[in-house]
Amino acid sequence: MTHRVELRDVMPTSSVPDRPRAHICVLASLNFPDISPADVALIRRFTRVALTTLHELGASYDIWDTTEPLANAHRAAEFDGLLLLGGGDIDASCYGVHTPHPKAYGVDLRADRDALAVIAAAEAADRPILGICRGSQLLNVARGGTIIGDIVDYSLHHGAPGEPEFVDEPIDLVPGTRLAAILGAQRVIGRSGHHQAVDRVGTGLVVAARALDGIVEAVEDPHRWFLGVQWHPEDDDGPEADRRALFAAFVDAAEQVRHVVLAAAAADE
């Protein structure tokens, strides 16, 4: 197995909907420095599941891979929504820490800056945004928040050396949040394999879920569709119903944006 993910590796076998409900910008970090064969396999599988789920829910997408510099991050505003997938750790300088943590891996500052520019463009256009794992952390950093460099007591969040990386993690949802309403539960089981997480919550965001040890597992803006989850709903070893509920709420929000934009364009004609 080559230590690289190609776009063809993540393409779903499903077809693009004939009349898409929404058109999504999917920002992926398919490759990063020192990527391992295990990470290659995970990224291929997780990305394919995410894209397949979008198709199943009636959405089309363009996938932007930050492996290479983006031509024009500001074009994210032209889509109906933004989905940020997982990847390597964020360069700590993006949140004001100038000594990298010794356990940081997969760091690519240029990719981080491209991702943050994409988030800024989508947010300025008031597009719904859903972030997963690295994507959730990027949303927090975009709002001025910080990241825990390494979770020392990690047993809830990832496997021990020599064990499977991903674990089934109990996660408590905060009542009254958008996330709790979407998933319709007080506790869910998420598929987790992370050694970092949100530390200081960014401006305008609230905690939407916590692990049993108090680690932040989701953040959201209570006033707009801006939501990040630390676990991986796109891991098909996890609950399908939760994945579909979360992605469906996101696609619904993007479809509403599409209707508003089309109505405005028609009024201008």
Image (cartoon, grey):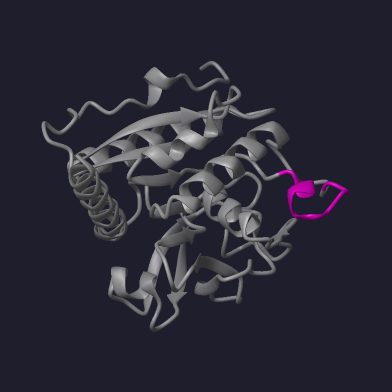
Q: Does 222 sit above or below residue 232?
A: below
Of the pair 104 and 254, the residue shown nearer to us: 254
Q: Is residue 97 magenta?
A: yes
Of the pair 212 and 24, the residue shown nearer to us: 24
Q: Residue at x 28, y 28 (%)?
A: 12
Asked if residue 42 can be seen in this view, the reply is no
Asked if residue 182 can be seen in this view, the reply is yes
Q: Given the current orientation, which residue lies at the most extreme right position? A: 99
Q: Given the current orientation, which residue lies at the most extreme bottom position? A: 175
Provide residue 3's location: percent of width, then percent of height: 58, 20
What main secondary structure does the magenta stretch of the protein show?
loop
Q: Residue at x 48, y 59 (%)?
A: 228
In the figure, residue 19 lies in which quadrant?
A: top left
In the figure, residue 96 lies in which quadrant?
A: bottom right
Provide residue 238's location: percent of width, then percent of height: 35, 54
Q: Which residues make up the magenta segment?
A: 91-100
Q: Does the magenta stretch include residue 137?
A: no
